[in-house]
Amino acid sequence: MQPEIILQADKIGKYFYDPEKFRVLNDISFQVNRGEFVTLVGKSGSGKSTLLYILSTMDTDYDGLLTIQGERITGQQQQRLAALRNEKIGFVFQFHYLLPEFSCLRNVMIPALRLGKYSRKEIEERAYAKLKMLGLEDQALKLSAKLSGGQQQRVAIARALINDPLIIMGDEPTGNLDSKNTGIVFDILKDLAHHDQQTIVAVTHDNDFAQKSDRTIELQDGQVISTRKLY
Ligand SMILES: Nc1ncnc2c1ncn2[C@@H]1O[C@H](COP(=O)(O)OP(=O)(O)OP(=O)(O)O)[C@@H](O)[C@H]1O
């Protein structure tokens, strides 16, 4: 069976002004299939975050063509992009951005409340189920600020999963974690990709993390210099 293409980047290019115009991304083309766990790697300044920002539909000012599950993203209206992000993309950042004054459960519920697809009761049940899946059912009603860094990152993953996104985008998802918690988060992401067929695209500086992912896409000076399939 042919794999389903979830993300397709075709000749993506981007310029910044600093203060002179310079090309930060050049001719980036690749595709990511359903259930793949892909890492974007490369030296500091190579363009990883800039690319992730485009792939996650937040930056619309670039050349080339981006499609997500066959839908043309390039040139789409902001309103459609916001809806698409809510529906199809879960975000996990280096700093979790949980709201400290809210419980873990409430934090996880937020993207679903925004989506407006489920009743409040359903949202609560879904949030609880995601926390349980990540081994955090006992922490559900605690304030997020009272949890350890590793636990908070798992809450952030539960929040990213609440709407069952097609793609999980990570910007240094383990950048703030020790090696034990990095391993835990890696295993969770791998499981999501390989068991639940979710698609993961994550920027990382962590070589070990990248080596263990299914494929690394390496950038240098805004260009893809290698894409390695590791399984
Ligand atoms: N808003 C901006 N305006 C001008 N230049 C920028 C802007 N954002 C990033 N840059 C430059 O673009 C280049 C790529 O930056 P980017 O953050 O994508 O790299 P990166 O690979 O993610 O780096 P790091 O690993 O350090 O996070 C760098 O030279 C950076 O200084």
Image (cartoon, rainbow, N blue to C red):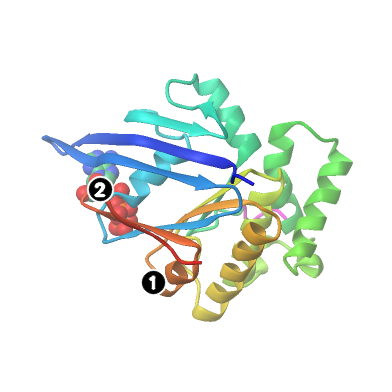
Q: Residue at 36% across / 44% down in the picture?
A: 51
Residue at the extreme right of the image, as rendered: 121
Residue at the extreme bottom of the image, as rendered: 180
| Residue under pointer 1 | 207
Tell me residue 27's x, y (percent). Answer: 27, 38
| Residue under pointer 2 | 223
Q: Is residue 163 visible?
A: yes
Magenta part of the chain = 99-103
Asked whether the residues under the numbered discs 1 and 2 touch, taking CB atoms below 8 Å apart as contact, a structural biologist would say no
Q: Residue at 80% across / 66% down in the picture?
A: 137
| Residue 95 position (above or below residue 210) | above
Tell me residue 46's x, y (percent). Answer: 25, 53
Camera-side mark, 1 or 2: 2
The residue nearer to you, when weighing 171 against 88, is 88
- Give the SS element for disc 2: strand
The residue nearer to you, when weighing 144 against 221, is 221
- Disc 2 marks a residue whose amino acid type is Gln
